[in-house]
Amino acid sequence: MRFLLSSILFLFVGCVSYPKKMGFEKTETFQTKILNPYFSNTDEDYVYKAKINVFKKTFGGILIIKKIEHNAHRVVFTTEMGNSLFDFSFEGNDFKVNRILKEMDKKILIDVLQNDFKALITENPKIIASFSNGKDDLVQTQIKKKTHFYKLEEQKLLKITRTGSQKEKVVFSFSEINDDIANQIEIAHKNFALNIQLNAI
């Protein structure tokens, strides 16, 4: 009987929505000009010192993100000597691998990196619902049919969380924010051996 009650309680808690677990209540539709402004300026070259830990290996170098035109970005990761580790192009829903290091040329990794950088550069994803805890806003969105929650404080984006089955899958954290530039970014995967740390140069 005790086991049955514990199982029922576990199922009940497990079914609680992600916003509810985080202490947020549903509100009216969220209004903002740009949900994610950090890579939205075509006049800006976004340059970061980067460290990528994947498959028990560490790749270090320079990551450059450039908005080419509306809905089009180029993401290039090189060594500090200028050798290309990967070079991706995003245009709308299209994605192209221009170049990638042989050690990183694995379909599963390319798919994960594509999803991560697509979330990182998307300015105005489709908004599904909005929530608030009285201080911060939480906006539920959809990118490539995957659920993402954007956490904002005073209209400033602090975190993006990709979820699945109401659990955190990937967390994008933004800090040291000045003039719509996040000087520090971390992308932490919960169920895949990948961590990306970016520090603006």
Image (cartoon, rainbow, N blue to C red):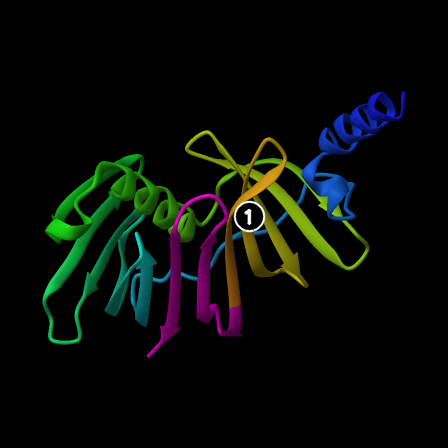
Percent across and percent down for residue 91 are: 26, 42
Quadrant into which the N terminus falls: top right
Magenta region includes residue 138:
no
Q: Is residue 46 left or right of residue 14?
A: left
Label 1: state its secondary structure. Answer: strand
- Secondary structure mainly formed by the magenta segment: strand
The residue under label 1 is: 161
* Residue at (58% x, 61% y) in the render: 158
Magenta region includes residue 177:
yes
Quadrant into which the C terminus falls: bottom left
Q: Nearer the viewer, residue 125 or 119?
A: 119
Please provide the residue range marked out in magenta. 175-201
Percent across and percent down for residue 117 are: 35, 50
| Residue 166 sits in quarter | top right
Circle count: 1
Callout 1 environment at 10 Å: few (<14), some (14 to 19), or many (20+)?
A: many
* Residue at (37% x, 42% y) in the render: 115
> Eyeballing the image, is 85 above or below 90?
below
* Residue at (72% x, 28% y) in the render: 15
Q: Nearer the viewer, residue 58 or 122?
A: 58
Q: Is residue 35 left or right of residue 83?
A: right
Q: Nearer the viewer, residue 86 or 7?
A: 7
* Residue at (24% x, 39% y) in the render: 95
Q: Is residue 57 left or right of residue 144?
A: left
| Viewer can see residue 44 | no
Three-letter code, disc 1: Thr
